[in-house]
Amino acid sequence: MKRQIIRLAIAFMLIGANPAYAIAVDAVTLQDPALETRARIIMQGLRCLVCQNQSIEISDAELAGDLRRIVRERVAAGDTDAQVRAHLVARYGDWVLMRPPFRLSTLVLWAGPPVLLVLGGIALWAGQRRREAPVLQPLTEAEQAKLREITAPD
Amino acid sequence: MIIELGHFALILAFVLALTQASLPLIGAARGNAALMAVARPAAFGQLIFLLLAFAALMYGFVTSDFSVQVVTANSHSAKPMLYKIAGLWGNHEGSLLLWVLILAIFGAAVAGVGDNLPATLRARVLSVQAMIATGFLSFMLATSNPFTRLIPAPLDGNGLNPLLQDPGLAFHPPFLYLGYVGFSMAFSFAVAALIEGRVDPAWARWVRPWTLAAWCFLTIGIAMGSWWAYYELGWGGWWFWDPVENASFMPWLAGTALLHSAIVVERRDALKSWTVLLAILTFSLSLLGTFIVRSGVLSSVHAFATDPARGVFILGFLVLVIGGSLTLYAIRAPILKGGGIFAPISREAALVVNNWLLATACATVLLGTLYPLLMDALSGGADKVTVGAPYYNATFTPLMVPLLMMMALGPLMSWKRGDLAGVLSRLQFALGLSVLSMLLVWYLREEGPVLAVFGIGLGVWLIGGALTDLAERIKLFRAPFATSFARAAGLPRASWGAMLAHGGVGIVVLGITASTAWTEEKIILMQPGDEATVSGYVYRFIRAEQGPGPNYTALRGQFEVSKNGAPLVSLEPEARSYPTPPMDTTEAAIYPMLSGDLFAVIGNPQGDKGWSARLYFRPLQSWIWAGAIIMTIGGVISLSDRRHRVGAPRRAATSIIGGAPAPHTAQ
Amino acid sequence: MRWRSFIPLILVGLLAAVLFVGLGLDPKIVPSALIDKPVPQFDLPPLPGKEPGLIAADLAKGQITLLNVWASWCGPCRIEHPQLMEIANTTDVRMIGLNYKDDPAKALAFLKQLGDPFASVGADRTGRVAIEWGVYGVPETFLIDGKGRIVMKHVGPLRPEDIPEKILPAIKAAAQ
């Protein structure tokens, strides 16, 4: 099994699997600077599928270039930011978004940090309550008598 | 022959580790001084043999001995010597050897200078340290032996990844490992204390220097990695929330909490449970990081070549070490109870809140890092998500804000019962400065993001807070200047260290805020003679030409930058093409200034339209690195404090309040 | 013994379980977003001699189809090719090729040299149609049922054991 996994890992050829450490500059950009800026921001939020953890904006993999072209086309065609993203999610799934979507399956992910914070806070507050010195109970009659006995001058 | 000697030395080190892991522990349990005394020579011996093994492997790399498998896989005769050396730890097997060597260095250090530790504690600490070493050494000997031969030897190696042929990156792993492995000392001390049955201020006093040293190294290691990414990857990014970056950040967060928590144990004999747990968790996170990088479970730019067999081994080791120590923690929880009482508003309470926020932040990073794996596992591969920077910006950053706000208050708060109103009134100067800076930024950058204004205010607040701390301690303006001066000269180094470190954080915050919010970028095609203006700086493209390098060919460009007509600097970025292994890289040309960095990148020509160029101005970018260095200097100064050099006081023979007499007297 | 102190241990145990499962998974494989969805309605011109190319409408006309994305420049495609020949020879599934960013002459030479399992091959010179199919690497293989819906996607080269383990059962399921 080990050999197969290694073979698969090496064998699956990613499109334009040139490690993307060179910069990506496209020859064709949108004429309207406002649209181009919008397109760039959308690209920053889309993951390059054949690189490790990079956005398509900075990757110089071939597929990233193809996807950038598509983003520009859709922005020029008048799609909103959400529509452009949806276009790519329809083809590649939620994985292509850098920001995980709000779904039932990502509930723990998004709710986790605030819940942890609150739970931690409650635990600390409870700990502080326990730490504070307990209220001393008044002495009983028998104990008072004993005390008088012990402290009485001889 | 030398390689085989190195292999033999590794095996001997393993045997010594095994001995050191068992005999002193038994000796401590039975009060047998002879068995306990085995620890010290064993630790020294382990160090010597691992140094020999390391030297042998280094010899293999330096002489380009391609009959050694790792040398062939990671080196090449044409590589500059510095990178042949760095190639030793630029791969899985070699980096493990570095790991165990550093583990042995720390162990030997405790064996050497830990004379003021009680014999049983020292024996136990060294035993636990050796248990970790045994695990790693057996892993190496079984699955990842750096001394494996390759017969017949090829004529030349496969070359090292050109990205690693860089001074910054060459030394980033050693610093990181000094940090990761340094936290193993805190772990060993914690587990030893749990076995012994006692956690007290003396213990905290012994643990702190090791933790501080590890923290300093890790801070530098992380900063170096970020700095490398910044100048190497070609677009000025320096933090990507990549799983392996997170794997180094989590121990740092936990380690920072540990450092502060240990202060409370030392001064007030409180927060013992927190501190011991943090000591265990910090090192556990280091181990988890090791697992993540080498097992292939997460997709990352950093991942070493992966092998599930290795992954299983490391996971098993992880379960044993972390599971074992946490079981011990749970069982011994009663001895960690109690301690000094403190009011809800006090320095202890502030440190508790500090722990709470840092721990939650650390847990958030852990959640984000492992969530893709969790979803993949639970959905059987059908449903995957990416957790990228937007998630962390939305969850991590909000946690940091209250923490940073409180950082200015904590050092001014008294122990046991603090006066919040008093502290706030003493911080008026810092607050005023902060508000002033926010107004100034708002005026200068009207269109700027609101959060950035707040970020600047926060950074200035922190620096102001550090200055206020200093002013308070030396009674500045409240006593004659000569008195203040004398007080400053006599201040304990730990105080200087803390002020520098906290001020350093403020500088980092300013750097991050400005460079993230106000970086201006121009991505264009340029012909020679073209000009582009970025934030008032005029980049003029002079020329670009192809040329050879030692083991690559490069496209070299030249830009002249001027401001207001006056020439400033000439930038010469490169785009390199390496043959073995085939890879293209960008070498950005960077000119750091106090106000920000000029950053230029050149790319290949697009037909006859010109050369592609990315030009930037990144405000306050260097403040990030400078701040990190200042933080580290603060840590180092704190390390040199008198009380660490003089050593901890002898433990009392009996405790006055509540405890049973100590089971042994100090030597 | 305080039960609260065991919480970290329990959490680590859960974490270890997740990590153990993770060792058997590949984080780089992206699951298809098109399972149980109709095929993208895009046509491709044919490779010379491999008419009629890729016609989306044809995929919904009742016959089960295997679509393989390949290229002559792709090494793993060579490795998996015998498996494609086997499927062509032993099943009556219609095989259609999507030739990705390739030179037609080289693509035809590839088929001539290694065998031609395809009834028809569409030439995607720019890779645009492949993006519609959610392709991100070569080779990839899709199974389409008689109603024109994608029912299975295999990423990477087909190994011999994938045929009985994955492909044949999927064909059988699609036939029902």
Image (cartoon, rainbow, N blue to C red):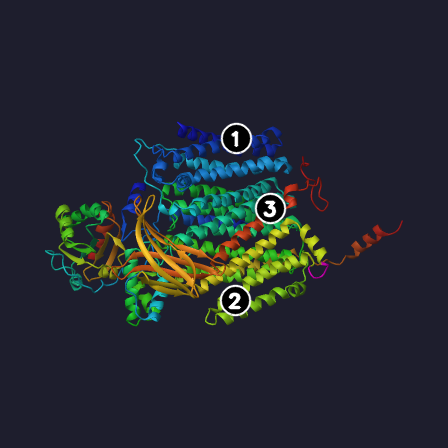
Q: Position of residue B18 (x, y in %)?
A: 50, 32
Provide the residue span drawn in magenta.
Answer: B476-480
| Residue occupied by mark 1 | B45
Q: Is residue B218 left or right of residue B658?
A: left
Q: Which mark is residue B460?
A: none
| Residue occupied by mark 2 | B454
Amino acid at circle 2: Phe
Dot 2 or dot 1: first in sequence order is: 1
Q: Position of residue B140 (x, y in %)?
A: 42, 36
Residue at 63% of width from left, 38% of height from top?
A: B117
Dot 2 or dot 3: first in sequence order is: 2
Asked if labels 1 and 3 share a chain, the reply is yes
Q: Tell me the SS state at disc 3.
A: helix
- Residue B387 shows in the view: no
- Picture quadrant where residue B506 is located: bottom right
The extreme right residue here reads A154
CB within 8 Å, label 1 to label 3: no
User: How many labels sit on residues?
Assistant: 3
The answer to if B477 sits in the magenta stretch is yes
Q: CA distance from mark 2 to mark 3?
A: 33 Å
